[in-house]
Image (spheres, rainbow, N blue to C red):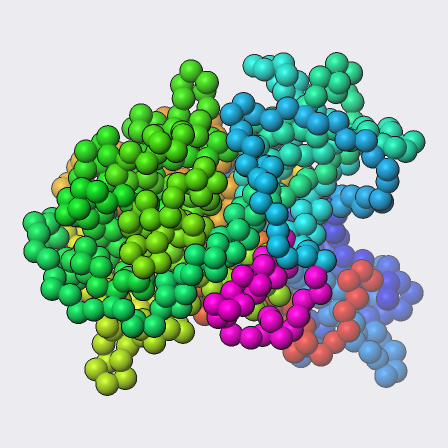
Amino acid sequence: MGIEITSDPVASGGKVQFTVDRLREPFILKFQILNNGTNCVHFTYYTALHKMRCFTLEDQRNVTRANPLFLCPGESYEVMVRYMLNHYGYFPATMYFEFCPDVPGPVPFCIVREMEALTRTPLAAELGPVSPYKPFQVVTYKRVDTVIVEGVPPERMEDSDERITYLFTANRALTPSSGLLNSALKMKTYSQQFHLLLHLEEIQMEVDIRKYDLHDQTMTQDQRNKKLLTLRVPGVAENRPSVLRGDCLRVSKSEDKVQPITVYTGYVHRVELDSVKLGFSKRLLQMFISNMKFNVEFTINRYPLKMKHRAVDLAAKHQLEEVLFPSGAAAANLVMPKFRSGLENNPQQQAAVQRIIAGSSKPAPHLVFGPPGTGKTITLVEAMNQVSRADPSAHILACAPSNSACDLLCERLMVHMERHQVYRLYASSRDPNTVPKDLLKHCNWDQSQEAFVFPDKGNLMKYTIVVTTMITAGRLVSIGIPVGHFTHVFLDEGGQAVEPECVIPIAGLLSAGEGQLVLAGDPKQLGPILRSPLALDHGLGLSLLERLMMKNPLYQKSTDSGHFDTRFVTKLLRNYRSHAAILKIPNELFYENELQVFADQWDREAYCNWEYLPKKGFPLIFHGVLGKDEREANSPSFFNVSEIEVLVDYLTKLMETQGKKGLPKLSAKDIGIIAPYRKQVSLKSKRPLSPSLLGIDGVGSVEEFQGQERKIIMISTVRSSINYVKMDEDFNIGFLSNKKRFNVAVTRARSLLIVVGNPVILNKDSTWKTFISYCVEENGYTGFDFKDAEGEDDIVSRLATLKINVDSDS
C-alpha cells in the first residue's frame, strides 16, 4: 500500500530491540511513518497490543479513528513510545498501525511492528547467552550393514547392569490387546498386563531417544585419562537424553559411506553438566585425531526395564496376591505393643509404629499416608529402629525411588541406630561426588578401586538394615538372597514409582505370609514420569500406593464411620515443618484443609519480621518478573537471567541480615533453590556470585527436592513464553500444568518461601493463579505490576476485536 515504517533505534531482524541502562530514566522510541506510494492514505489509529504501564504512546496530532491524519505521497509522520522502566526484566510489545486508502470503498489495512525493551544489571550481562541457540538437527538413519567394535565399560560395572541373563517372557513385537489393556488389573493376568505396558513404554523410549542422535560431532581426549574421549551432550543434565554411567553410545565416522559401516560402542564412564566421558576400544583410540567427526546414536538403558519385567513374573511365582491385592482376611486386631519412642508428642506417628511392629495388617501392606512435612520418613525411621529392638533377628530392606531419598533415610537411621547395623548399597552408576561424605564410610564404596563394588551375599545378610533404591534392590534377588531373609520391606516415597518398580524389592525377597510391607508416600506429590501416552492411559502411571488407596476397599474410608481402618492405614495430618501461610494454598487445593500446623514456633516464625518482606508476619514472597526464557549454543535447557538477578539479590540480602535483629545464622544447608531447568540452577554457580552464595548445598530440580526441606526455599519458575508450555508438558519438566510439581516445590520451606516468576504466564494455570491471587490479597506480592499486562498469546484475540486484515510489511 506504499507505507513504510522505520524506527529509531533501528529494527534488526524485524524487531526493534534496545537496552535501557538505568531504571526510572525515560527512553524514547520513535516510529517514522512514510507514505512512499502514489496515492494518499488516512492514518486512522495506532495502539500497542501488549498493555503495559511501562510505556506511553504519543503523537503531535493525537491520531484516532475520529481524528485521522491525511498523508499525501512523500509525507511522513512520527509516533513516539516513551518508556519508563521501574523494574529489571524483558518487556516485549507489538505496535499496531492502522491505515485506510483514500479511494472509493476503502478496505482498511494495518502494519505491526515488534519491539523489545531490556533492562539488566552487569550480572545479567555476564550471565546472558554465550552464543545464539542452534538446535541440533534431527538425524535420520537409514538401515545399513554394520560391524560393531565393543568399547571399554567402567571398572567394576557388574555384568548384570547391562547384560542381565533374565529373558523377557513377552514378545516385544506383540500387537497390543485392547482386551488386556482395558481389563482391570488382577493377579491372574498381572504379569501379562505389566509386560505389555512396559513394552509400550520401552518402544516410546526408543522413539524418543532417536531425537537426540547427533551428526558430525567432534570428541576430545580427556586430559586426566587418555583412554577416554569426551563428547558434548547438551541437555544431558536434564535427562534430555538420559545418560548414566555404564550406558553405551554408538558412534561411526561421518565420512564412512561404504557398507558395512564400522560402529564403535562407547561406554559412559562419567556424566558432567553438558558432556560425557566415553571408553572406546583401542582400535578407535589409535586412529583418533582431534578434528575427526562422528555420527552419534544414543541407546536406552534397559536394565531398569528388565528388573521390572522380572519382578512382575516373580510376583506371580511367589504368590504375592495377598500383598498386591489384599483382602484383609488374615489381618487381626492385635494388642499394640508398648515401647519407648521419640514420638510421644505425636499420637498418629506413634500409633503407626505400634501397628507396624505388631504386624496388624499382615499379609496386607500397611500404608503411611501424609501430606508434606507430616513426618512420614521420621515415622518409617522410628518404626525400623523399634522393629530391630523388638526382634534382634529381624532384617529390614529400606528403599525409595531416588538416591537422594535413600540417602536421607540412611542419614536419619544412623542418628538412632548403631552405625554398623545400617548399610547403604549404591549402584555402580552412582557418581561418588554426589554421595554425602558421611555415607561413603557405610556403603559399598571401595576407595582402592575408586568404585562402588557390590558386596557378596554373606556380608550383605549380616546387616540389620540395607538401604538402596528400588531398582538396585533387584541385585539382591540376582545374587540369591533367599525369600524371607528380609522380614520387613519399607518403601518410602512410594507414590513416585510405577508399580513394577515398587514390586522389585518385594518379589523374590519378601515372604507373602510372614513378611511385612510398609508403603509411605503422598499420591498428591510427584508421581512416576512416563514417556508413553498409551501406557499412561492404561494405568502404568499409577503407583502401587495410589492404586491401593484408590481401588482397594481396605485403604478407603468406611462409608459407615467415615474413618480409615487403622490396621491398614495411618494418615498423618500434623505438619511439623512449615509456617501456616506457606501451607495454606496446598492445604486447600490438595488436602481438603485437613492439614494441621504443629511446627516449632521459633523455627516457623524465624523470618516473619524480616525487613525485606512485603508484609510483616507473612513469610511468603511472590516476586513478579517479566523475564525472557533463553537458550544458548546447542543446549536445549532454558534459563531466565532476569529471574537469576532477583534470586541473587534476595540471597545477598539474606546473607547480609543473617544473625541480626533476631534472625538466625544460616548454614549451607538452610537454603534451597528450585528450578525446573538444569541450566537455570547451573547459572547460579557462575563467577559473578560471591563465595558466600556458592556455599548453598540445595540447588536442583523439583524431583531432587521431593522428601527434603529447608528453612528457606527460593523457586525460579523460568518460563516467560507461552510458546514453550507444550514442550514442558511433553518432557515433564516445567511447573505449568503439573499440579503435583507445584505442590512439592512450595511445601519444602519451613520459615520463608520466595517465588520468582512471570505472573502473566503463570496466571494461565488455575493452580498458580490461585497461589498468586493469595499472595496479592495478603500483600505478599512485589515486583512487576501485572494487573494491566497482557500476555503474548492475547495478541491474536486483540487483533480479532479490531476486525481488520493484518499486513505485517506494507
Residue 135 image-quadrant placement: top right
Chief SS of the magenta region: helix
Q: Position of residue 333 (x, y in %)?
A: 17, 69
Q: Nearer the viewer, residue 707 or 106?
A: 707
Q: Nearer the viewer, residue 551 or 431?
A: 551
Is residue 780 visible in the rendered image? The answer is: no
Would residue 136 be found to the left or right of residue 361 on screen? right
Please identify the quadrant where the C terminus is shown: bottom right
Residue 353 image-quadrant placement: bottom left
The magenta stretch spans residue 182: yes
Q: Position of residue 448 (x, y in %)?
A: 42, 15
Residue name at image x 30 percent, y 54 percent: 515
Would residue 195 be found to the left or right of residue 382 on screen? right
The image shows a total of numbered marks equal to: 0
Residue name at image x 48 percent, y 60 percent: 316
Q: Position of residue 374 (x, y in %)?
A: 24, 57
Q: Nearer the viewer, residue 314 or 494?
A: 314
The magenta stretch spans residue 772: no
Residue 272 image-quadrant placement: top right
The stretch of residues the image draws in magenta is 174-202
